[in-house]
Amino acid sequence: MSERRPAIRFLPTAGLKRDLQTLHDAAMKRPHGAEGRLLRVALNQLSRIQQGAPGTHPLGYLPSYPDLSDCESTYVGADPNAKPSHRIVWREHAPQRPGEPVTREVIALGERANGQAYYMAGQRLGRPVGFTLAELAAQREPIASPSRPGRRLIGSFDTPSKNEPDLQFE
């Protein structure tokens, strides 16, 4: 009896789409070169991620990188005899309700050199270097000062009111 895999909702982010477009543009200039091979390998790996394949390894927290401890990394490269040159960074979200599929959100496809893929993913997720996910969750977001008057009419944003102070944050 074969074990059935849970359904997966594949969610490529806008950032990933830009990464793929950049790689595609380079591959169109040299379809039989490294860029063309890298694009084919990356698309194959994205298909495997969509089908439920595990990542190459889960990421952890390192103080010199954004915290991507809720993400996975999958290695990709054009040359099968060399260390993979690129990383795909993605994360899996559990279903919100029973019966819904898990979601695999693919955040970035970037170069391995100097952790570029990890920095891109951190930036796209709004995670600065040196903060853990717990520290980021505990930070208060700036809120408008309670002394600020109520609402403005939509058309008034380009011309400040004379009796209304500038937006203040605590």
Image (cartoon, grey):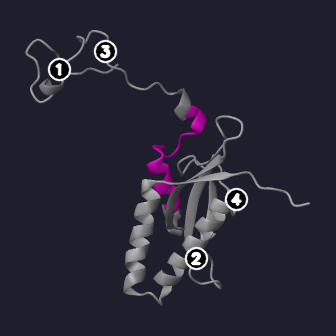
Write down the residue under mark 4.
52
SS under mark 4: loop
47 or 100: nearer the viewer = 100
Q: Is residue 122 left or right of residue 62?
A: left
**Does residue 131 show up magenta in the picture?**
yes
Q: Are marks 4 and 1 in contact (CB under 8 Å)?
A: no
Q: Residues within 10 Å of mark 1 (few under 14, many from 20)?
A: few
Q: What kind of residue is marked 2?
A: Val
Q: Mark 3 falls on what kind of element? A: loop
Q: Pointer 2: residues within 10 angstroms few (<14), some, or many (20+)?
A: some
For marks 3 and 4, give the one nearer the viewer: 4
Q: Is residue 119 left or right of residue 48?
A: left
Distance between the alpha carbons at the discs numbered 2 and 3: 51 Å
Task: Give the label on residue 145, or none.
Answer: 3
| C-alpha span from label 3 to label 1 | 19 Å
Question: For residue 97, which quarter of the picture?
Answer: top right
Q: For the image shown, how many numbered marks are present on the structure? A: 4
Residue 41 marker: 2
Residue identifier under label 1: 153
Give the magenta range.
117-135
Q: CA distance from mark 3 to mark 4?
A: 47 Å
What separation in Å lies between label 1 and label 2 (alpha carbons)?
Answer: 52 Å
